[in-house]
Image (cartoon, rainbow, N blue to C red):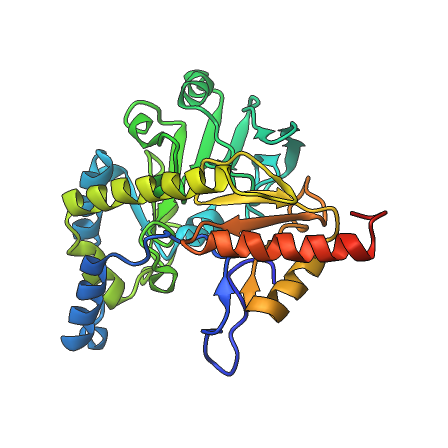
Amino acid sequence: MKHGGYSWRNGKPALDVKDFSVNLNPLGVPKFVEELINEAVRLKIYTYYPPQNLREIKSVIGEIYGVSEDLVGVFNGASEVINVLDDNFTVPQPNYSEYKFRSYYFAEEREDEFVFKLKAGRIIASNPNNPTGSVIKLNEIEDFLKDKKNELVLDESFIDISLAESASGLVNEFSNLTIINSFTKSLAIPGLRFGFSLGHKSKELERLAPIWRINSITYYVVSNLNAKEIRSFFASSRSKVKEIYDKLENAKKLFKMYKSYAPFFLVEFKIPSSLINDELIRRCKCYIRDASNFLGLRNTHARIALKDDVMGLIHTINEIISEKRELSPHVL
């Protein structure tokens, strides 16, 4: 598995697996979203075509993020925005593996964090970075954008539930900035496939996408969201992320944990992460993200999502490492 969660079986998700490979909001789906989904099903909204005019949804997104609805593009998940972009970009690596690019450069790997710098040109990058959890600071982004020869596509899919500052407020001023975001992670609804862009190029990107980009249930849910309620939920989510990190800071860990601002963190073991994963599945039906396919990472790297029971996962990983250390002390 590379991304998208643990594999489905017989047409159903693996409900018995604790999937720490998927980075969703640790608070889960908010009650007001569940109520809207249930209401949509009760009203049989799925028997209706969704509107072709997405103005109502754009108005909601614009209010949440403080931008004009004219700068909002609506898509079938952040992946659709990424898919309609051209490939004439440079990517600082490691980064999300679905970005199309013609060149790349590596971030600086320090003892416990990755440091990303923006180099001149057309850049696409995630912020917070997936998979490292590092951030590019807002003042660095602004300095980069002041040179109009530069262009930045910033994927902020995790920003709303991260300990980092969004650059969405800059799209009003800088036409060379496009923000990609989605409610997949922040509202823990990957199955509804709702993503959006913020920026002056949103309309241009929408013209490259299909007409029927979102289904009627997704349209019903998002167009009926309350912007104030969403912002409040995001604030509670960030507090939850900080609470879990505070616990993790003092936890015993027999492996390297990198500094992260995101609702996930990167780790490195002294043996391949695939071996750790095999043991986790056998012992506790837990699963983490093997990060070996990210450019710039090693087969000993893994990414772990923040969940309430992450401390139990850390304990089990420590047990696995301790036992393997006893068997092969020269390796561990």
In the rendered image of this protein, does residue 100 appear above or below residue 153?
below
Q: Nearer the viewer, residue 253 or 21?
A: 253
Q: Which picture quadrant has residue 188?
A: bottom left
From the viewer's perspective, is 160 left or right of 97?
A: left
From the viewer's perspective, is 213 left or right of 309?
A: left
Q: Nearer the viewer, residue 86 or 33?
A: 33
Q: Where the N terminus falls, by quadrant?
A: bottom right
Q: Nearer the viewer, residue 261 or 45?
A: 261
What residue is shown at x 37% (from left), y 54% (from top)?
184
- As drawn, the residue found furthest toward the right would be 330
In the rendered image of this protein, does residue 12 appear above or below residue 17?
below
Spot occupied by residue 37 in the image (x, y as percentages of width and height): 22, 67
Spot occupied by residue 277 in the image (x, y as percentages of width and height): 64, 61
Is any part of residue 200 visible from this angle?
yes
Is any part of residue 51 visible from this angle?
no
What residue is shown at x 64% (from left), y 46% (from top)?
294
From the viewer's perspective, is 72 left or right of 112?
A: left
What residue is shown at x 60% (from left), y 44% (from top)?
253
Spot occupied by residue 51 in the image (x, y as percentages of width and height): 20, 62
- As drawn, the residue found furthest toward the front would be 326
Q: Nearer the viewer, residue 233 or 4?
A: 233
Q: Which picture quadrant has residue 228?
A: top left
In the rendered image of this protein, does residue 213 appear above or below residue 95?
below
From the viewer's perspective, is 188 left or right of 262?
A: left
Number of labels in the image equals 0
Spot occupied by residue 232 in the image (x, y as percentages of width and height): 20, 42
